[in-house]
Image (spheres, rainbow, N blue to C red):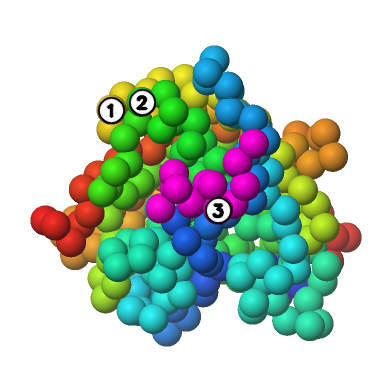
Amino acid sequence: MSFCIDRAKPFRALDLDTLNISPDGAEWTLELREDEPVFKGHYPGNPILPGIYQLEAIIQGVEAYCAKLNIDVRLHKVKSMRFLAPLVPLDIMKLALKIDVDLFSEEVRVNAVIWCGAVKTASAKLLFLILKEELC
Amino acid sequence: MLNHQDIKRFNPQRYPIALVDRILECSPNRHATAIKLVTASDHCYAEVADSANFTAMAYPYSLMIESFCQAAGPLAMQLGLTFADQIMLFASMGDIEFFGSAYPGDTMTHHIRVTKVMSDAVVAEGEITVNGQPIAKFGQLMVVARKSLKDE
């Protein structure tokens, strides 16, 4: 990454091998490993990916996309997010982000959809703010 | 007041994603106040490089949301939501805004208001403050109780 500030991550939700960045967004897939630490606690004997980890994956994808443009961003608003189906170990998430970078208003608008096979697991509309370079 | 062990009687989440330390008050008028201390030993910081900027230790916003929702769990159960033999899942969230960050050494105080309770779902709103200053606002969070997926 460029001058972006390292983030503290609950887990690494970007598979750089599958990450595909295009002019208007990013896509990647991520297999949920059985030994992912969060599954021990969510929930014991019944592992399910916490919904907020889907949000975290989107955040990381936006940060990686913006890093390619040498800009640093912070999540400002979750306008809406819907969780449509649960994800469990060994599921393969496919994340598709439409990213609109507005340098004039210093905002990044994101529409995200997450799939597992043919099942849509989540959708979200987010707003990020572009940070000033002097923070780095 | 509910300590962490008390909270575990209500909430099914466990380490590393049991993210509420103490419920300070739980009012029958649908208000609750809870705290989550941020510490450098939190699981989310395990991958932060020694050379990283201090701002890398900002508590992840995704976990702030999770912590806030977990703090609403005991209040929701007291108001009628039943979790027995069930699990809690996010259904939706919206109108969430972040104004600042929390770092190791900070105490996040959750100010929770439950706006709707059904037998299998709860809707809540509120704020998180650090040292009395708001760092996040939650307009609408909906959590549902579902049978264990293993039973399906």
Magenta region includes residue B15: no
Mark found first going from the N terminus, 3 or 1: 3
User: Residue at 82% across / 58% down in the picture?
Assistant: B105
Question: Can you say whether A44 is above or below B49 in the image?
Answer: above
Q: Chain of mark 2?
A: B
Binning the other alpha carbons within 10 Å of mark 2 as few (below 14), some (14 to 19) or many (20 upward) gives some
Q: Chain of mark 1?
A: B
Q: Quadrant of the N terminus of chain A?
A: bottom right
Mark found first going from the N terminus, 3 or 2: 3
For the residues labelled 2 and 1, say whether their Cβ atoms are less than 8 Å apart. Answer: yes
Binning the other alpha carbons within 10 Å of mark 1 as few (below 14), some (14 to 19) or many (20 upward) gives some
Question: Can you say whether B120 is above or below B15 in the image?
Answer: above
Q: Secondary structure at mark 3?
A: helix
Location of mark 3 (residue): B5
Image-based side of A37 in relation to B50, left or right:
left
In front: B52, or A131?
B52
* Amino acid bearing label 2: Gly
Q: Quadrant of the C terminus of chain A?
A: bottom right
Location of mark 2 (residue): B80
User: Residue at 78% across / 57% down in the picture?
Assistant: B103
Q: Chain of mark 3?
A: B
* Amino acid bearing label 3: Gln
The image's mark for residue B119 is: 1
What is the magenta range?
B1-12
| Label 3 vs label 2, nearer the camera | 3
User: Residue at 39% across / 81% down in the picture?
Assistant: A35
Which picture quadrant has residue A132? bottom right
Report whether mark 3 lies on the same chain as mark 1: yes
In front: A95, or A106?
A95
Q: Position of residue B27 (x, y in %)?
A: 58, 22
Seen from this angle, which residue lies furthest top? B29
